[in-house]
Image (cartoon, grey):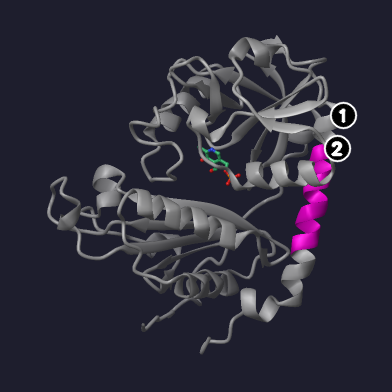
Amino acid sequence: MEFVAKGLQGYFRIMLININGVITGKEDAKVSVFDRGFLFGDSIYEVTLTYDYVLFKLEEHFDRLWESAESLALHISHSRKELTYEVNKTLKQLNEKRAYVRIIITRGEGMIGLDPNLASKNNVIIICKSLPENPNWWYETGVEMIIANILRNPKESMDPSIKSGNYLNNVLAYAEAKKQGAFDAIMLNRDGFITEGTTNNIWMIKNKEIITPPLGAGLLPGITRQTLIELAKLKNLPVSEKNFTRDELYSADESFLTSSTKELVPIVKINGKSIGSAVPGPLTRKLHQIYKDHVQECVKQGKNKLFFTIFPSDSD
Ligand SMILES: Cc1ncc(COP(=O)(O)O)c(C=O)c1O
């Protein structure tokens, strides 16, 4: 496979976009209007980040990307090694310590029509940009959420466990949150159980038990969610995947959300109701510290193999 990176001198380096191996700045990053990602949301994606130049949990994100692809019978034209190479190539050019990395695979371009076979070849798009530190107040004060009126897509429909480019369900829920001045929205399923936030997983703590909804509730298997479950178990903290309702969430001692870029953000109010004493709880803080220690450990290990993971030689 021939990959060409050219003419980058003039580009603003804070954001670079790799389209099928060619890296450009944002002004020149264009895909066809006949791309099925644009026409139908017929695409999949992943978001991860770098800490101190080290890509975080790329393998886990790839696992989920390939699972999403399989669920949609969407063939990924790149191997894992080729995709790793392209991500690293873009990050190397970007040269930012803390970078946002979005990998998008669309089913490709073709004549307008629902038939997936109309597309001949994937488009592979990697967006890398500098990622500022998250605002301190998220962690110090905590955030307010709403419960959205719109329900999460049922699993039997557009399954939320697939990280597809079709995010309208979440866009609508997020718009509800913004209308009410909230940080984000939590979506329920048809049975009245909590599923997840629009781009994050939801947790509650009750009598020291750490609880997050099971995958069966219909939600994205968050990588941060899975990491935290494993870390809590390692530390012998009681953690479980259990359904809970909005009323149970209101009466929780603590609550928080998780995502790769946000880590753990305390939730202090939901629909105007205080959670616990409406301040970030002690167990939430402890879990966040455990998570941050884990990140540091991963970064340390990543640095040991830096030349392979971040700066591969061009012939790799
Ligand atoms: C719907 C949804 N749920 C949960 C998450 C959190 O997933 P992760 O921890 O892998 O970032 C995301 C991340 O984008 C998401 O879009």
Q: Residue 286 is drawn in which quadrant?
A: top right
Q: Position of residue 34 (x, y in %)?
A: 20, 54
Left or right: residue 111 compared with residue 241: left
The answer to whether residue 308 is seen in the rendering is yes
Residue type, mark 2 in image:
Lys
Taking the spot 51% from the left edge, 89% from the top edge, the residue there is 315
Quadrant housing the N terminus = bottom left
Q: Are marks 1 and 2 in contact (CB under 8 Å)?
A: yes
The one of 59 and 288 positioned closer to us in this rendering: 59
Give the magenta part as a residue range: 286-298
SS state under label 2: helix
Magenta span includes 32: no
Kindly give the residue lying farthest to the bottom in the view shown.
315
Q: For mark 1, what is the residue?
A: 282
Magenta stretch, main secondary structure, is helix
Taking the spot 50% from the left edge, 14% from the top edge, the residue there is 192
Q: For mark 2, what is the residue?
A: 286
Ligand 1 under 8 Å from disc 1 Cβ: no
Taking the spot 51% from the left edge, 75% from the top edge, the residue there is 85
Residue type, mark 1 in image:
Pro
Mark 2 crowdedness (10 Å alpha carbons): few <14, some 14-19, many ≥20: few
Q: Position of residue 38 (x, y in %)?
A: 28, 48
Q: Position of residue 129 (x, y in %)?
A: 56, 59
